[in-house]
Amino acid sequence: MLGELEKRFAPLLRQVASPVDPETISGMTANYTEALPKSLRNSTVMLNNPRSAAHRAARECGLAEFLRSPSLQAFAERVSGFALERSPGMQVICYKPGDYVGPHNDHHPEEAHLRDGYVDVQVTLTNDDVDRQYLLYESSGFFNRSVNVGIASGVSVSLLPFWHQVTPLLAKPGREATARRWLLLVSFVKR
């Protein structure tokens, strides 16, 4: 599967980079008033547009069928405890060495269908060149939980929003050029 992702989706990925704005420090006028907008760096492609090359690639290799499958939705419903709408959002994300997502909560209060939360299913597939990458998340009001997501493969189901971040991906020594963690992301709206 990693070979298929690399072959079909690497050419379609769009790098996303939103660095930390220096004015988050220089613009402060009072102590302890820092505010950090979401910062990130990774590569991604959305799969929902049926006319896009990414959607076509996902259809050709069976990925679109899998991500929209009734069985994956039933799994997400069973784990989350929510009835979920069909037609989920689908995205492929690729993390390379140094790629990360800073603290954020994925809350969308301006979107009526998302403001009360939604369910993400994440399938992670990581090649052997990755040393580690951590998901840090909030529990009881503190960023005090972490899990290594730089593992060979895994599936998670999350109810959003909640505070979390993904640390920079670290490659094994000498393998920086080829280290990759692929994330297949499916977002379901609650019914």
Image: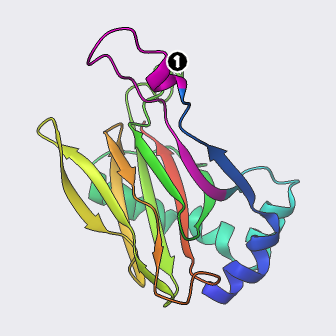
Q: Position of residue 97 (x, y in %)?
A: 55, 70
**SS label for mark 1:** loop
Please determine whether, in this image, residue 62 is positioned above or below residue 16: below
Q: Which of 133 and 124 lies nearest the eye of the viewer?
A: 133
| Residue 69 seen in the current view | no
Magenta segment boundaries in residue numbering: 23-43
Q: Is residue 69 magenta?
A: no
For the point 38% across and 80% down, the residue is 151
Query: In the image, what residue occupies the spot 22% across and 44% down?
Result: 138
Q: Residue furthest top?
A: 29
Quadrant showing the N terminus? bottom right
Across and down, in percent, residue 137 comes to 26, 49
Q: Residue under circle 1?
A: 110
- Indicate the quadrant containing the C terminus: top left, top right, bottom left or bottom right: top left
In the picture, measured across the screen, residue 142 lies left or right of residue 166, that is left
In x, y percent, where is residue 184? Answer: 55, 65
Total marks in image: 1
> Residue placed at 11% from the left, 39% from the top?
140
Residue located 47% across and 68% down the image: 169
Assign the magenta stretch its main secondary structure: loop
Residue 27: % across, % down: 49, 15
